[in-house]
Image (spheres, coloured by chain):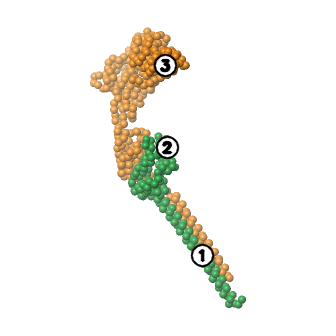
Chain colours: A orange, B green
Amino acid sequence: MARGQASVVGMVFFIVILFISYMSLASIVSKFERLISNVKVEEVEEELEVKVSDYYLVTSSYAQSLNLIKGTHVSGTLSSFNEVDGDCYVIEGPPIGVGGMWQELVKNGDFEDGLTYWGVDASYNAWITTVEYGTAETEYGQSAYAHVIERSRWLWDDVLVTFYQSFTISGSVDQAQLSFTFKVDFIVSGAQVYVYIYIDDDLVNAYGPYTSDLNWYPVSEDVAEYLTAGTHTLKIVFRFITGRFARPDVYAYLDNVSIRALVQTVAGLSEIVFTASFSPPAQNFGLVLNASGYFDMGDPVEVQVIESNDVRARFVFTTSDFSFNVSVASAELTIRMLSVSQFTVHVDLLRLEVKTPKASFNVTIKCLSEHIDILRVWYKHQYVEVNKVLGYGDEVTVTINQSVDLSEMIKVVTKNKVHKFYIKL
Amino acid sequence: MSQSRRGQVGVLEQMLLLLIVLGLSVMLFLFHLNALNVLGRNANERFERIERSYTTKLLIEDIYFNNVTETLHTFVTNVGYDCVIDSLIVDGRLWLSGLNLRLTYMESAWINATFPDWFTLTKGLHEVLIVTQDGLKFEGVIYVG
């Protein structure tokens, strides 16, 4: 009996041992699995430096237009700015003390900045007529327009659309010339169009009636008698008289409004101010203004380059020859020159150097790790094969046959990962 | 009962008990052996899978969506052991399957997925997954502007 009990105890002990060994093994395997799962292959540290070079061409853009605000034009044309020997654009500054100085009184007369500085009034019967106004693209770039459509076939309306601008004159005016151009386009005829010019409330002249299309019509009026020191308002009024039994649809356009006045001033400084416009390519990486020439002067001349009412650069020239380069952001620049005595400037060169994108550019990759195996360089979904192993400090340069676009990334593919870089010029 | 007869019963009893003990022991041993085999097989499969995940490596070098052809282009390079690309998943939706694209070491390929007319990738970020036959996923992100 005792032997039987011993066998049962032995069996139980055997089972317990088996169970413990099984559990231990299972636990070991499970732990090992977990350990393996948690093992992470350390990502190979790779450090690269990418530089972009040879991505632009320098082209020249000469002044396309010049607006002389202060000073008297002596000689030269726009082509004189093209660094032609012996041909300069010459501007004379006003004398110190009491003297006459030509000034442009109208701002944004070409409407290239929309209706900035301008006010518009429209008087019409909204039951009968629809009137629109604003600026629109024409042969002269942006032009102001008034658009009148009569909705009633039986009634008629007298529509007045007035474009006006106020200006201030600092002294008495010796001469003043008002000029502008206008045109009339009839989509549907049946109306009469008149143009009236007022300075303050004085009628300068009236044009019309026009009952059919009129191409750009130049207007030039001597307005010196209307201008005295103080503030005045120029009004250009388009009057549309729509006829009965018709539903006319008419556009009237206005552009190049200017009042050039010779204003008597008392000046402590002789000052020349002009605005130059350039037409650089729209896609560029920067503009540099180059200017050179010489002064006929008695005292040093200060030259300011003004961009959007901010003085971008200032130079003082004590010798007659001058030359300067300045980085600018805009293609519309104002140059201001001033001295304590009367002077004349002879501008030989006035141009913008423009960095335009090349059809290709170079990418230089420098290895800053122990070694890197470079496979390819991607740009705009196209790649260039490299397949080179670089050691620390080694460089490789590849040419991308596309022009640089700052919004696109350069991707350098190594055997371990894809490195992405934004282009910094 | 005589003395000898009692002795015979005792021996039988002992032998029966021994048989039971031996039978249970063998059964337990076989059960144990089977369990260990299953455990080993599972562990082996898992180790293999882990090994595959470390040795299979795809680089998604470039992804872009052509709005005109409504095609998603993905450029893939195999920088690990040979593998077979099976499917393409965009934003959790299976767009291509059964590709059976075998890439050997350092081999590259474009995978082009043309979407149906009623579906297009909207503006923004989208997740693109390349899935191998082993079930391994490689993620790329595309920005549709």
Left or right side of B89 for A96: left
* Camera-nearest residue between A230 and B113: B113
Q: Which residue is mark 3?
A: A247
Q: Which residue is mark 1?
A: B25
Indicate whether B139 appears above or below A345: below
> What's the residue type where badge 2 is placed?
Trp
C-alpha span from label 3 to label 2: 47 Å
In the rendered image, residue A105, in percent from the top left (x then y), is placed at 44, 17
Left or right side of B91 for A359: left
| Disc assigned to residue A157 | none
What crowding class fits label 2: few (fewer than 14 Cα within 10 Å), some (14-19), or many (20 or more)? few
Secondary structure of the residue carrying tag 2 is: loop
| Disc assigned to residue B118 | 2
In the rendered image, residue B106, in percent from the top left (x then y), is placed at 39, 54
Chain of the residue displaying label 2: B
> What's the residue type where badge 3 is placed?
Arg
Find out whether the residues at labels 3 and 1 contact each other: C-beta distance under 8 Å. no
* Camera-nearest residue between A124 and A418: A124
C-alpha span from label 1 to label 2: 67 Å
Nearer the camera: disc 1 or disc 2: 2
The lab-note entry on whether marks 3 and 1 share a chain reads no
Left or right side of B76 for A131: right
Secondary structure of the residue carrying tag 3 is: loop
What crowding class fits label 1: few (fewer than 14 Cα within 10 Å), some (14-19), or many (20 or more)? some
Nearer the camera: disc 3 or disc 1: 3
At 56% from the left and 66% from the top, the residue drawn is: A26
Chain of the residue displaying label 3: A
